[in-house]
Image: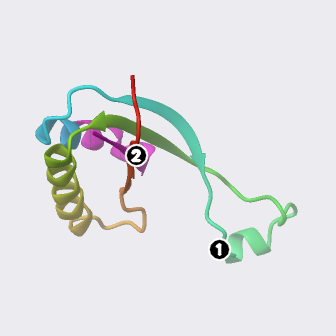
Amino acid sequence: MKLVIVTAVEQYQKDVLKLFKKANIENLSSSDIDGYKNTASIVTASSWFSGEKAANESSLFFSFTEDENIDALFSLIKEFNTTLESNNPIKAVVVPIEKFI
């Protein structure tokens, strides 16, 4: 068993849920988060509050699942990311679990 963690901008929330379902990952948790990028832009630099960084509304998903489901999910995410027209791909990581109850 491993822990898979996925982050995405809010507009992809329904898509991520579909990807989990296609990968046969039925049990998962999610949370709303704020995503930040440490890139300077013209808009930020010209702002009165240039030290403040705007957050993107994002979602974090996680599930404890088996390797074959994670492999399927990663393939689906890679395929999904190739179709994006934005600079906000879905990101995923896997964390091994040493013990669980």
Residue type, label 1? Thr
Give residue 17's position: percent from left, percent from top.
Answer: 26, 36
10 relative to 31, above or below: below
Give residue 28's position: percent from left, percent from top.
Answer: 32, 29
Start and end of the magenta stretch?
A: 1-17
60 left or right, relative to 70: right
Residue type, label 2? Ile
Residue drawn at 46 percent across, 41 percent down = 60
Observer-nearest of 16 and 28: 28
Give residue 15's position: percent from left, percent from top.
Answer: 25, 43
Residue drawn at 40 percent across, 42 percent down = 98
Q: How many marks?
A: 2
Question: Residue furthest toward the top?
Answer: 101
Q: Residues within 10 Å of mark 2 (few under 14, many from 20)?
A: some
Q: Which mark is residue 2?
A: none
The residue at which mark 2 appears reads as: 5
Q: Which mark is residue 39?
A: 1
Q: Quadrant of residue 26?
A: top left
4 left or right, relative to 21: right
Give residue 32's position: percent from left, percent from top.
Answer: 52, 34
Location of the N terminus (image quadrant): top left
Q: In what element is the residue under mark 2?
A: strand
Observer-nearest of 86 and 101: 101
